[in-house]
Amino acid sequence: MKVLGLIEQRSPARFLAGVAAPILATVVGLGIGDERTTAASLVYLLGVVAAAAFGGLGPGVFASVASFLGLNYFFTPPRQTLSVGKTDDLVALVVFVTVGMAVSSLVALGLAQRARAERRELEARSLYAISSRMLASEDLDAALTELAVSMRRLFGLGRCEVRIRSDDGTSVLRASDGDPVAGAAEISVGLSTADRDLGALVLFPGGAPFGEAERQVASIFARQTAAALERGILEQEARQARLAAETNRVRRALLSAVSHDFRTPLASIKASLTAITGDRDDALLTGPEALELLRTAIEETERLERLVANLLDLTRIRSGSLAPERVHIPVEELVEDAIAGLRAPLAEHPVEVMIRADVPLVDVDPVQVEQVFRNVLQNAAKFAPDGTPIRIAASRWQDAVEVRVSDRGPGIDPPDREAVFEEFFRSGDGREAGTGLGLAVARAIVGANGGAIWAEETPGGGATLVVRLPAVADAR
């Protein structure tokens, strides 16, 4: 790229190489001796090559003529004149200037071709890098800014702007690099695909030339940019369509929950309190009957509270507002805390905990993952017959820790093992119904913490829920 700039620049300063090389060669030749004509001619020829290499064809030809004159004046008898005393010397001078011009032409041409090849390689690499960045980047503005920076450096622009057409048809500046060039005419290269006019690349040439070849390369960059922009627009439209479909699905599920899950505990609470209070103040129930109805109201209130809490948790996780605060913590601590918080639901089930000694620490949010184990254990206690054990086993698995919670209940049918993690799922076998949110919340939390959860069959009968959590890399 630097060689190409030296060869192709139009500044008169490049001719300094054509002037300086013969002068320096003359000084070196006189230092060798004015009778050493052969040595002097070789020094002059070296100067011609240097002038052609640094200045291009014009300075190389100028250096050839100047060297011819210097060799004639200082080193060819009679010296310090431009006359030539011998025919052999005249032939030698003519051969010298011919060879000098040929060498300068070949050197300049070879370097120019090499420099252009380097520039094409640089353009191809820049195009590939920018295209890859734009197609892979989620931050479109950062990718467009990188595009502006790369194009300004590649073409020697004073300024490069990326203008995107908005929905109302106006052109909006999305990214730029460089300062405005006073008096520079802008060059607009359209960002368009077969179906859309997305905007334009606006280029302000600086000191470097910007011709048809550069415009063609800029057009290639523009086409790649337009393709990346269209891909981003299509992905955004697809996300909006998926979001709309998900919103409708959740809305329908929420309506089902409100019509059943919310109404059932509210009806129980109302019935219990109505039975206690009666229609008149003097008809209040007292004694064991009232106490039992109050217990029923409290249980239904807690059920309703769990449903609302699960709904809120699921909403926050799906919206990304409940970001995990991950720390390094032993998995047995999470399991013990979850068991301690479920004394009542687990009262009828002996809990067996088996954690291997080589289990490493896990990298998770302890509050969130404890909630996962609570939901899983509640699910196991709900469906397992009273008196049957619930087993918790933890072991290392590659770069993760697997915690398996097994019960001796009716198990989960293979077709339903994935569906149980969906919101408001109801199995059709008449088993005890819940809110249908506990396992959906568990999967959302585990996924946010970089893990996975799935259901398996317990050997001998029952269901096993497997929670895989990321382990600390250097923990043993």
Image (cartoon, helix red, strand yellow):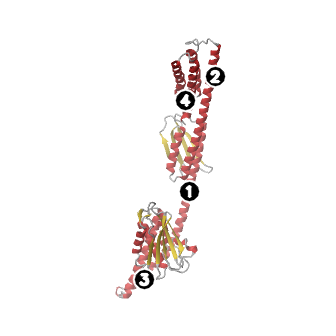
Left or right: 293, with 49 as reference point:
left
Q: Residues within 10 Å of mark 2 (few under 14, many from 20)?
A: some
The residue beneath circle 1 is: 235
Q: Is mark 4 on a helix, strand or loop?
A: helix
Q: Which of marks 2 and 1 is nearer the N terminus?
A: 2
- Per the rendering, the mark at residue 54 is 4
234 or 328: nearer the viewer: 328
Camera-near label (2 vs 3) is: 2
Question: Is 295 drawn above or below residue 166 in the view shown?
Answer: below
Question: Is 352 drawn above or below residue 474 in the view shown?
Answer: below
Q: Which of marks 4 and 3 is nearer the N terminus?
A: 4
Camera-near label (2 vs 1) is: 2
x and y, in percent, of residue 276 in the image? 38, 85
Q: Which of marks 3 and 1 is nearer the N terminus?
A: 1
Camera-near label (3 vs 1) is: 1
Q: Which amino acid does label 3 sit on?
A: Ala
The residue beneath circle 3 is: 271
- Asked if one can make out residue 38 in the rendered structure from this viewpoint, the answer is yes
Q: Which of marks 2 and 4 is nearer the N terminus?
A: 4
For marks 2 and 3, give the CA distance: 115 Å
x and y, in percent, of residue 444 in the image? 48, 66
Callout 2–callout 4 Cβ contact below 8 Å:
no
Q: What residue type is labelled 4?
A: Phe
Callout 2–callout 3 Cβ contact below 8 Å:
no
Q: Earlier in the sequence, mark 1 or mark 4?
A: 4
Q: Which of marks 2 and 3 is nearer the N terminus?
A: 2
- Quarter holding the N terminus is top right
Q: What residue type is labelled 2?
A: Thr
The residue beneath circle 2 is: 98
Q: What element carries label 2?
A: helix
* Occupied quadrant, residue 325: bottom left
